[in-house]
Image (spheres, rainbow, N blue to C red):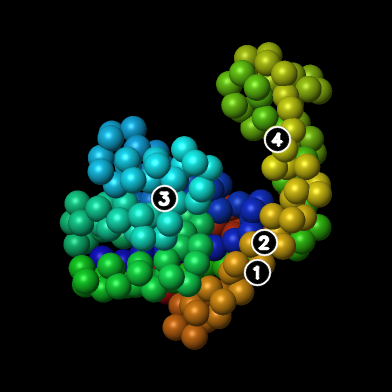
Amino acid sequence: MQAIILLGAPGAGKGTLAEGLKTSTDYLHVSTGDMLRAAVKAGRPVGLEAKSYMEKGELVPDAVIMKIVTERIEQDPPSVKYMFDGFPRTLDQASMLDDVLASHGGRITHVFMLDVPRDMLVSRLSGRRVCKNCGAVYHVQNIPPRVAGVCDVCQGPLYQRPDDCEATVLNRLEVFKKQTESLIEYYREKGVLVKIDAGRDRELAKADIVARLGS
């Protein structure tokens, strides 16, 4: 059992790269957010536990998140290769993930740190627009709609999410930096941290990761 991690600030392109890597490698993309929502929807005990925090507007504790991850790991065969996207987020989560993988004979082989200049991150996030009707995502510069402010898919209105306003974006980036400094050092000391230039074309960044995995 092997695992890799895509680590990067909001706007670094973790989700996009993960989607591309799914078709280029034999790694299974694991999203803790998707697993959390599935556990809640299925009414499993751990899902109900997580829901109790979510309904109060509180963060789901590390221990509960790890229960969900552990359940998933226990149901997969030993030959599986995981690709975690934006997880773990804290040192405690990282330590617990190491323990869970080790108990199944597995380990993390690479942590890909997606490096993107700060001004590019701000541009990527603050330029994002989302359709109110169907949720399609655009960018005022990189992926503009055919008609400004109108969705190509359903002709619904496009809007900027509150999280994508520039002031909020700057705060999100600062929070990410503070949260991950110790996490980055943790993986650097383990010798598994690999910096990837994710500010360039996504296909080049993906090819770099695939080459590192092949070596």
State the CA–CA distance, disc 2 to disc 4: 18 Å
Left-right relation of 28 to 125: left
Q: Are marks 2 and 1 in contact (CB under 8 Å)?
A: yes
Q: Is residue 124 left or right of residue 37?
A: right
The Cα–Cα distance between marks 2 and 1, rounded to whole angstroms, is 5 Å
Nearer-N-terminus badge (3/4): 3
Image point (42%, 66%), residue name: 93
In the picture of the structure, the residue carrying the numbered disc 4 is 161
Q: Secondary structure at mark 2?
A: helix
49 sits to left or right of 143:
left
**Label 3 vs label 1: CA separation?**
21 Å
The circle on residue 167 is: none
Residue identifier under label 3: 32
For the residue carrying disc 3, how many other residues have a C-alpha within 10 Å: few (<14), some (14-19), or many (20+)?
some
Left or right of residue 35, residue 182 in this image: right
Indicate which disc residue 178 carries: 1
* Label 2 vs 4, first from the N-terminus: 4
The label nearer to you, 3 versus 2, is 2
SS assignment at label 3: helix
Residue bearing mark 2: 175
Q: Amino acid at mark 3?
A: Thr
Amino acid tagged 4: Arg
Q: Return the residue nearer the eye: 162 or 137.
A: 162
Residue situated in front as seen by the camera: 26 or 71 = 71
Q: Nearer the viewer, mark 2 or mark 4?
A: 2
